[in-house]
Amino acid sequence: MKILLYGINYSPELTGIGKYTGELASWLTTQGHEVRVVTAPPYYPEWKVRAGFSAWRYSRRQEDGVTVIRCPLYVPAKPRVLKRLLHLLSFSLSSSLAVLAQWRWKPELIILVVPTLFCAPQALLLARLTGAKSMLHIQDYEVDALFGLGIARSGLLQRFALAVERMTLRAFDRVSTISSGMLQRAERKGVNRDRLRFFPNWSEIARFTDVPRAPSLLSRLGVAPDKRVLLYSGNIGEKQGLEIVIEAADRLALRSELVFLIVGEGAGKARLMEQVYQKGLDNVLFAPLQPYEDLPALLASADCHMVVQKRGAADAVLPSKLTNILAVGGNAVITADPDTTLGLLCAQHPGIATLVEPESAVALIEGIERVLGLPALNQVAIHYAREFLDKERILSRSLAEV
C-alpha cells in the first residue's frame, strides 16, 4: 500500500510525537508498504532547528527506507500564543505544495498526525483527488489545550475554533487517538463511534526490560552516588506546569538525600532555571535530553518518576513518557484528576502508579513520599506494559483496523 504520513513532528526528534511518527513510518516500511512523509525539519523540544537541517528550504531524502519531504517553517525562540499560531500556519502553508504534489503518486492511505489541524484542508483535498482513505490521528487536542491551559482566553475565538475543529474531525474517514479519554472526547465532538479507532502510543518493551541502575550515567549528569533521584524527563513546556516541581524542591531542600533531576528541553526551561537560581536551590539539577540508547538506563536509575501536567491538559494531551516508565518498572507519581484517563488507569490497575491532585506542590510531595516507600521495581507496571504497550502488537492491530 502507498501510505502518506503528514505531520509537523518527525524523527530524529527524541521526544513526543516526532518519535512515534518516525517509528510508525519505519515499521510500515518493514511491513512492505511504500511510505512517504511530509514534515518539517526537527526543532522540538528545543524550539530550534537542528544542525544539518534548514528552516527555510525544502528537502527530500531517504531516511531508513522512507521518502521524507521536509518543508520550511517559522520556529520562534519563545513560542507565545501568536508566535505559536504563526509557527503552525507557516508549516501548513509551506507543506501544502508538497502534499498536493503527491496526487501524481496517488497514495492509498493518508494519515494526518495532529497537531496541527491547520494541515487538514490539504490532506482532505488530496484524499478527494486521489480516492485515498483519510485518517486523522490525534496526539494532542490542540484547541482544547490552547484554551484549557489558559494560553488563549477569548470566548468568541474559542467557540469558532471548536466549531471548525468539529467540522474537520467529521470530514475524515477514520479518527484515531491514544487514550480512552481522548476517544470519548472525539465522540463528544461529533465523530461517529464506528469511525473511531484506538491507536495508543507504545514502548519497545525488550529494550526496557531488566535494565539496571546506571551510576555512571547519573554521575555524568551530576548526581552524587548517595542520592535518591526524583526524575522528570521530557518536554519542558506550558502544559506540564513544572513550577510545582520547583516549589516541591524548595519545601524539601533540607532533605539532603533527595535530588530533583530535570532532563529535557523546551520553552519553559529557562524560566525554571531562573526560579531555581532565585531560590538558591542546590537540590535541583538540569540536564539536556539524553540519546535514546541511554533512555532505558536513565529511567531505571530513578527512585521516583514525576509525570506532571496541569489540570487543563487532562485528556487533551497525554504524557507519552509514561509508556517507557511503565516498561522499565518505574514507580511514578502522576498529577491528574481521578476522572481523567490517567486517573482511571490508576484506579483500574492498582499499584501501577501513585495518583495525586494536579497543580499542588503539597500533593506532589505526599506522592513522592509514598513512592519512595515502594519496592524498587514496580511489577504491576511491568505486567501492564507487556500486555498493553508492546510496539509490535499495537502497530499490527491498529493498522489492521484502519
Image (spheres, rainbow, N blue to C red):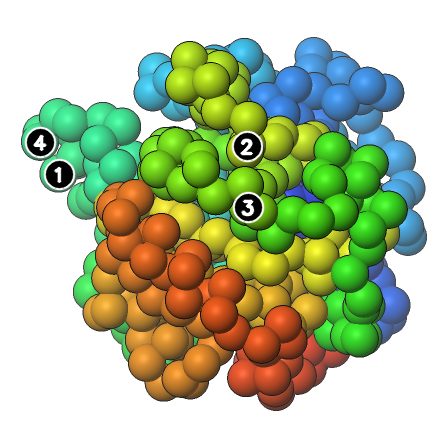
Q: Nearer the viewer, mark 1 or mark 3?
A: 3
Kindly identify which residue carries mark 4. 155
In this view, 33 is above or below 22: below
Kindly identify which residue carries mark 1. 159
- The answer to the question of whether label 2 and label 3 lie on touching residues, with beta carbons closer than 8 A, is no
Residue 265 versus residue 121: which sits nearer the camera?
265
Q: Nearer the viewer, mark 2 or mark 3?
A: 3
Left/right placement of residue 10 relative to residue 66 reads left
Kindly identify which residue carries mark 3. 258
Mark 4 is on which residue type?
Gly
Residue 317 versus residue 366: which sits nearer the camera?
366
Give the CA separation, mark 2 to mark 1.
41 Å
> Which disc is residue 284 wearing?
2
- The answer to the question of whether label 4 and label 1 lie on touching residues, with beta carbons closer than 8 A, is yes
Q: How crowded is mark 4: few (under 14 residues within 10 Å), some or many (20 or more)?
A: few
Give the CA separation, mark 4 to mark 2.
39 Å
Left/right placement of residue 59 relative to residue 314 reads right
Residue that sits furthest to the left in the current view = 155
- Give the structural element (helix, strand or loop) at label 3: strand
User: Residue at the location (41% across, 49% down)?
Assistant: 308
Precedes in sequence: disc 1 or disc 3: 1
Mark 2 is on which residue type?
Val
Mark 1 is on which residue type?
Arg
- The answer to the question of whether label 3 and label 4 lie on touching residues, with beta carbons closer than 8 A, is no
Left/right placement of residue 229 relative to residue 61 reads left
Residue 277 versus residue 271: which sits nearer the camera?
277
